[in-house]
Image (tube, grey):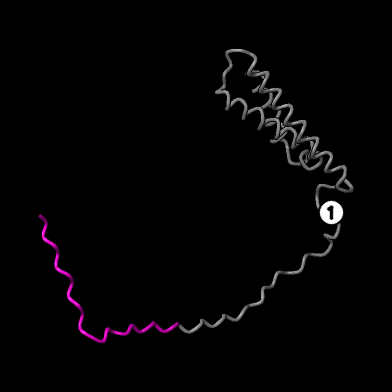
């Protein structure tokens, strides 16, 4: 229970302070969020079994593993992805061109196909056969 409280406190503290931390440190942010989701998913899957400390330790290890893996992937992507800028920079001096959609002329509907004319039979209809009597 203590690990759950500590995880939620840390996550809420970082979340409620501002988004500046998340913008400056995307790897840490994704690691914290991934770890919290991994820990809470494990806790939900085990039914919040707090009778022994093994489940809490197992879920803590799962949360830490998920957080480290996801944070590492994001850190590697930022490292290899360019200058380390996670926010679009440059080229913002001029506003983007306005979006103008050209009106399309409506396509004419094709004429309806004529219904096929069924030819009536040329002679009188034959009577249906009489039912056979049951023995």
Residue position marked by numbered label 1 in the rendering? 89
Q: Alpha-carbon neighbours of circle 1 within 10 Å: few (<14), some, or many (≥20)?
A: few
Tell me the chief SS of the magenta region. Answer: loop
- Where residue 86 sits: x, y (%)? 81, 47
Q: Considering the image in quadrants, where does the N terminus appear?
A: top right
* Residue visible at 13% across and 62% down in the picture: 132
> How many numbered discs?
1
Residue range in magenta is 113-135
- Where residue 45 sits: x, y (%)? 58, 27
**Foreground of the two, 116 or 49:** 116
Which of the 4 image quadrants contains residue 104? bottom right
* Residue visible at 82% across and 64% down in the picture: 94
**Foreground of the two, 35 or 134:** 134
Q: Is residue 123 magenta?
A: yes
- Where residue 21 sits: x, y (%)? 78, 38
Element marked by disc 1 = loop
Q: Is residue 77 magenta?
A: no
* Residue visible at 51% across and 81% down in the picture: 109
Left or right of 77: which side holds 32?
left
In the displayed structure, 123 sits above or below 89; it is below
Q: Residue furthest top?
A: 52
Q: Residue furthest front?
A: 135
Q: Considering the image in quadrants, where does the C terminus appear?
A: bottom left
Which of the 4 image quadrants contains residue 41? top right
Which of the 4 image quadrants contains residue 42? top right
Q: Residue furthest bottom?
A: 122
**Foreground of the two, 30 or 92:** 30
């Amino acid at each position: 229970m203590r690990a759950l409280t500590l995880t939620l406190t840390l996550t809420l503290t970082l979340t409620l302070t501002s988004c500046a931390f998340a913008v400056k440190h995307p790897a840490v942010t994704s690691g914290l969020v991934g770890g919290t989701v991994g820990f809470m998913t494990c806790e939900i899957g085990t039914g919040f079994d707090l009778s022994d400390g093994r489940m809490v330790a197992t879920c803590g290890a799962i949360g830490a593993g998920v957080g480290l893996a996801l944070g590492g992937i994001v850190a590697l992507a930022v490292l290899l992805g360019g200058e380390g800028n996670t926010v679009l920079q440059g080229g913002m001096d001029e506003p983007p061109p306005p979006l103008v959609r050209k009106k399309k002329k409506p396509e004419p509907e094709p004429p309806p196909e004529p219904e096929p004319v069924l030819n009536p039979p040329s002679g009188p209809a034959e009577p249906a056969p009489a039912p056979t009597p049951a023995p």
